[in-house]
Image (spheres, helix red, strand yellow):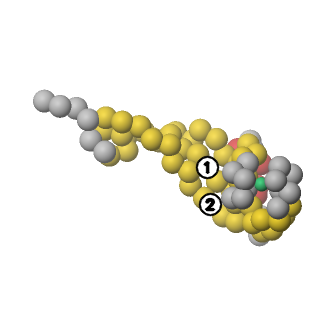
Amino acid sequence: MFIIWGSKNDVKTERTLGYSVCPNCGYNTEKVLAKEKFKFTLFFIPIISVTKKRGICCPECGMYKELSSAEYKELLERQ
Ligand SMILES: [Zn+2]
């Protein structure tokens, strides 16, 4: 019997934060709040999902500013 297992990283965009100038690339881009998850799969079904990091991402240069879960939650709930 074969057991097929694997793992993958998944980035989930949760909301946009509006436009601001990126400190890294200097472009005025729309920043997004994103979570990076690590998934362990068995027969292509995700069994374990662990949030590796959360933060603000710049879609222009890919800069990722890591946030604590409290900071992330605050930004997520802010209107
Ligand atoms: Zn940038």
Local SS, label 1: strand
Q: Which residue is mark 1?
A: 35
Left or right of 43 in this view: 12: right
Which amino acid type is marked by label 2? Glu
Crowding near the residue tagged with mark 2, few <14, some 14–19, many ≥20 C-alpha atoms within 10 Å: few
Indicate the quadrant where residue 17 lies.
bottom right
Indicate the quadrant where residue 40 lies.
top left
78 and 21: which is toward the camera: 21
72 and 44: which is toward the camera: 44
Q: How many marks?
A: 2
Measured from the top left, where is residue 68 in percent x and y?
Answer: 74, 42
Residue 26 seen in the figure: yes
Which amino acid type is marked by label 1? Lys
Q: Residue at x 13, y 30 (%)?
A: 1
Q: Residue at x 59, y 38 (%)?
A: 52
Vertical relation: 20 (above or below) 9: below
Vertical relation: 69 (above or below) 57: above
Q: Residues under labels 2 and 1: Cα distance?
A: 7 Å
Residue 70 seen in the figure: no
Q: Which mark is residue 62?
A: none
Q: Which residue is mark 2?
A: 14
Measured from the top left, where is residue 71 in percent x and y?
Answer: 77, 48
Image quadrant holding the C terminus, namely bottom right
Marks 2 and 1 in Cβ contact (< 8 Å): yes
